[in-house]
Image (cartoon, grey):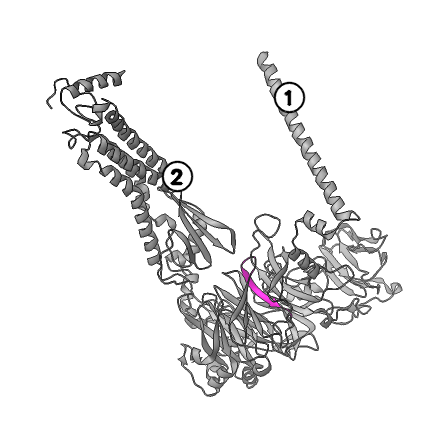
Amino acid sequence: MTSIAANSVRHDEFQDGHRHLTVAKKKPGGRHFAARWSVILLSLAAVGLQVASLFQPWWWIKLYAPQYPKGLKMVISLTGVSGDVREVDILNHYIGMATMEKAAAVERQLAGYGIAFLAIAIVAVALLAGKRLNKLLAVVGFAFPFAFLADSLFWMYRFGHTLNPEAPIRLPAFTPQLFGNGKIGQFMTFAQPSVGFWLAVAAFVVLLVAAFARSRVCAGCAKKGECGAICRDGFVGPKAGAAP
Amino acid sequence: MQLSIGKALVMGGAVLGVAVAAASCENKAEQKATQAASGALGASASLKQLMDSRGLSEADVEAAVKTYVPGGKADEYMIFASGGHSGQVLVIGVPSMRLLKVIGVFSPEPWQGYGYGGESDKVLAAGKQNGKSITWADVHHPNLSETKGDYDGQFLFVNDKANGRVAVVDLTDFMTKQIVPNPLVASDHGGAFVDPNTEYVIETSQYPAPLGRAYEPLSEYKNKYRGVAMFWKFDRQKGRIDVEKSFAVELPPYTQDLADAGKLGSDGWAFINSFNTEMAVGGTLEGKPPIESGASKNDMDYLHIINWKKAEQLVKDGKATTIKGMKVLPLKVAGEEGVLTLVGEPKSPHGCDVTPDGTAVVVGGKLDTHATVYDFAKMKALIDQKKFEGKDDYGVPILNFKEAIRGQVEIGLGPLHTVFDDKGFAYTSVFIESVVAKWSLKDLKTVEKLPVHYNIGHIMAAEGDTVSPDGKYVVAMNKMSMDRFSKVGPLYPQNFQLVDTTGEQMRILIDAPIGIGEPHYSQMIKIDKLKPISAYKPGENPYTGHVDPAAVLKEKDAKIVRNGTTVDVYMTAIRSHFVPDQIEVNEGDTVNIHLTSLESAEDQVHGFALNMYNVNVSLEPGKHENISFKADIPGVFPFFCTEFCSALHLEMAGYFLVKPK
């Protein structure tokens, strides 16, 4: 098995004076090896979670009014809004609010590419970034759900502040509630995050762990600032007699 | 082979499974049935058990007891409700909310033989517009005749919004006696409201159009399009509207909406709310905003205040012009002479209801959260002092809003109509919020809101628009029923909800599905104010109120008289035969059947139907009908009785033969 080979090689290396991982002292080729793999697996898991979130609802908004005893539900995902959108659009026209299809049109188009970009970025950072950059993992993980929240908030604000003055009912500008209970006209609204958002948050948590693990990799190595999860010396196996 | 055995086994298993499932289902159903039977019918069954088996709460049972009217007992009140598109009027008992009758008004109604070959054809024919027979209507507002501001139970008036018509229903026999088409308007809405002594039936137009329905392009909207307030003179003696003595007041092309007549101190005045004072005409194909937007631009529209007594005098003085044979008081005169005054009303209002004491007019905000209470005395004083804020483009004086109102009541989203009780409370229907808001007339404060199901339009209270409302009941007339009834396809019944207003809190007693059209307004009258007949005078023609000259009061007087190509059949109907029962005519003859019911006993009704000639009349006891048609189809046509009158009802028949040319 390669691991045995790697261990033995590393052991040699350790004897050679090149100390890649302090723990390796105690268990040569053990923890640093596990940490490396965990960085890679966690990063891939995060990518998996993010990709999965693309196919899950991120947010839902429920509206209740007397004449809608079952309520109206809008499900927001990265690629669009589904549910009782048509009915909500019809109602919104009375107050001159834009139709849902106009919300985040570009973002929705780009969501798939965005996820692909994130996946590549995460894998690249995980594998290649040195210690100084490894925090990027967490930043990227955080940026994903945060960007969604910020963008949603932006659109909520925009929709509530660009009401058509020609509308039959004129309301003062407002920002629809993005979280929790709100009230618009006869509607009680309730909004909260859904599976997709939590998957993205989970991906962030996973990436945090990955970043932490990454910081443990090569903690004792002189080259720890240079190499990524892929160590030219350690991960693919050091060259015998390599310079310290 | 093996495969097929396996298949057979699987299939057998499946069949067995289904059979077992079915058997167990049956067992369960049987068990349930026996349980229910023992609960409902068992001698020891208690009310509690019954409630449990039907899943009823104590409140449900209380409501049921409050609305249950055993057979043989009469309801306390009677509702006359618009039948909406059906062109009919619905008669409903309260508190049972049972449908008692459907009165044919603007559209033919076969059971009453209304519009199927008899005298009633003339009533419907009088309702033609532009010579065109219109067999439907958008029935909106039934109004009972009043004496001194209180219902007298004699007549009912109702308007057809779609085609600008007003009808008179006689409440002695619950039959429509007259339809008056308004030749001036394209549609109406604010009708058919009466003044406290039913001198006039008020009908105001809705969508402005050139008076007399002439052509004018929409670019001429402001100059040539107009509204009118029609005052149809009612001749109570004759029980008919007297078109000759009626008059109209020309109004600006604001979309006049609902109307009401003043009472007591404000008698002699009428009030109309309006929307679209913006005069928007749409143009959606050209990218212009639809009327719904255009008509909602202004924050204020205009309440129209009409001094109709003065208008009546001016018309008498010859100040009216004549359009399409109708006397119309011109807008200019109306504005100058103080007949018409305007006052602002908050955004796209709806509802216009005079309080029982006649001192105020309540207008709902629709797009404003308030109901505005206009003070008649203040408005009258301002008009008398000519204290105007300005004039509109047509020279009509405008009162200052703040100076004209008593106050505003914070109601909620979409207040529409208001009715009143006997304890100083008003009840406003609130459409968007889907509630009934109860508020105090004294301090203009909302005291309670009752959710109704759903989207309430009109609201009505027991005699709630008279000078002495009864209280007790309010009916919420809801536009949507959603989850309230069993599903009957995508066109859902409307929902009348009877609300008990006697307790601390309002309570819905019962939902009544209305599956015949979209009703608008209705009125509720104490049953003892109505004096309906149970039979006509022998030989009476219901449309003249007299014994018909062609009535046949004795069987021996029945005969067939031929005069050239006209055949007059003098016919009688009594259990269980017609005399004559054989009629033979020639193809092309004009046939007049003068048919009298010789019955006098209560509920002893016959019908007369002639196959293939679209003839069916109802023969209530004593009634005389004149049926007239051309015998243009040769052949053999049995005629027969269409009410199951007796054991030998099926034998109550005869033959009508048309000899071909």
At mark 1, the secondary structure is helix
- In the rendered structure, the answer to whether residue B491 lies left or right of residue A136 reads right
Q: Residue at x 60, y 82 (%)?
A: B264
1 or 2: mark nearer the eye: 2
Which region is colored magenta? B450-462
Residue B571, placed above or below residue A126: below
Residue B12: which disc?
A: 1
Query: What x and y, as percent, mark residue B530?
Result: 72, 71
Q: Which class describes the residues within 10 Å of circle 2: few (<14), some (14-19), or many (20+)? A: many
Q: Amino acid at mark 2?
A: Gln
Query: What x and y, as percent, mark residue B469?
Result: 63, 73
> Which residue is disc 2 drawn over?
A56
Query: What x and y, as percent, mark residue B441?
Result: 54, 75
Q: Residue furthest left?
A: A243
Closer to the camera in the image, B24 or B50: B50
Q: Residue at x 68, y 32 (%)?
A: B24
Closer to the camera in the image, B95 or B515: B95
Give the main secondary structure of the magenta stretch. strand
Q: Chain of mark 1?
A: B
At mark 2, the secondary structure is loop
Query: What x and y, as percent, mark residue B430?
Result: 52, 64
Are tags 1 and 2 found on a single chain? no
In the rendered image, residue B461 lying in the magenta stretch gets the answer yes
Closer to the camera in the image, B440 or B572: B440
Residue B349, placed above or below residue B434: below
Q: Which class describes the residues within 10 Å of circle 1: few (<14), some (14-19), or many (20+)? A: few
- In the rendered structure, the answer to whether residue A10 lies left or right of residue B138 reads left
Q: Residue furthest bottom?
A: B385
